Image (cartoon, grey):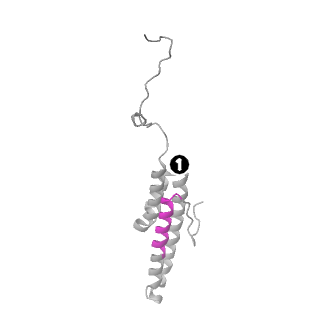
C-alpha cells in the first residue's frame, strides 16, 4: 500500500533544460573583451574612426569598453599628431620617422588588444590624454 502522508517531490529538470534569461541587461564578459580588443585593433585599420564608433555606442553599457575605448582614442589621436610631425620631417629623415611611427603604432595596438582580450586594463605609454 502507498503512504498518502509522504510529501510529494517535484520532478527535477536537468540544468541544460533551463530557458536562458534574455532579459538580462548588459553583455557577457567575452563580448566586452572582444569589443575592447576591436577598439585597439581598429586603430590599425581605420585610425581613430573605428575606436570612436565602438566607444560611442558601448560606453554606457560597459565600464570596461569605456576605459579601453578612451585609451584607444587617446592613442590614435596622439599617433595622428605624430604622423603629421613625422610627415613634415620625412624629407629630412628619408621617411624613417614615418616608418618608426607606423611600427610603434602597430606594436602598441597589438599589445593593447591582447591585454584587452585577456581582461587586463592596458595603458599606452607616450600617450596624450585628450579624453578623460
Residues drawn in magenta: 104-119
Q: How many numbered marks have been drawn onto this rendered protein structure?
A: 1
Place of residue 23 in the rendered image (x, y in percent of width and height, measured from the top left)? 46, 36
Image quadrant holding the N terminus, namely top left
Say which of 16 and 80 sits in front: 16
Place of residue 36 in the rendered image (x, y in percent of width and height, measured from the top left)? 48, 57
User: Is 104 above or below relative to 64?
Assistant: below
Say which of 130 and 37 sits in front: 37
Is residue 108 a member of the stretch shown in magenta? yes
Place of residue 26 in the rendered image (x, y in percent of width and height, measured from the top left)? 49, 44
Name the residue rendered at 47%, 80% in the picture.
100
Question: In the displayed image of the protein, which residue is found farthest to the front?
Answer: 1
Residue to which mark 1 is pinned: 60
Q: Secondary structure at mark 1?
A: loop
Please name the predominant secondary structure of the magenta segment in the image.
helix
User: Is 73 above or below relative to 13?
Assistant: below
Name the residue rendered at 42%, 68% in the picture.
44
Say which of 130 and 117 sits in front: 117
Name the residue rendered at 41%, 33% in the picture.
14
Is residue 28 a member of the stretch shown in magenta? no
Image quadrant holding the C terminus, namely bottom right
Place of residue 10 in the rendered image (x, y in percent of width and height, measured from the top left)? 45, 22
Amino acid at each position: 500500500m502507498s503512504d498518502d502522508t509522504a510529501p510529494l517531490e517535484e520532478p527535477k529538470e536537468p540544468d541544460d533544460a533551463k530557458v536562458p534569461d534574455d532579459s538580462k541587461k548588459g553583455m557577457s564578459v567575452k563580448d566586452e573583451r572582444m569589443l575592447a580588443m576591436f577598439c585597439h585593433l581598429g586603430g590599425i585599420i581605420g585610425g581613430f574612426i573605428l575606436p570612436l564608433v565602438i566607444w560611442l555606442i558601448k560606453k554606457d553599457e560597459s565600464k570596461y569598453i569605456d576605459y579601453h575605448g578612451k585609451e584607444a582614442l587617446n592613442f590614435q589621436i596622439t599617433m595622428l599628431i605624430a604622423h603629421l610631425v613625422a610627415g613634415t620631417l620625412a624629407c629630412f629623415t628619408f621617411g624613417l620617422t614615418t616608418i618608426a611611427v607606423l611600427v610603434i603604432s602597430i606594436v602598441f595596438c597589438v599589445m593593447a588588444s591582447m591585454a584587452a582580450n585577456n581582461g587586463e586594463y592596458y595603458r599606452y605609454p607616450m600617450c596624450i590624454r585628450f579624453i578623460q
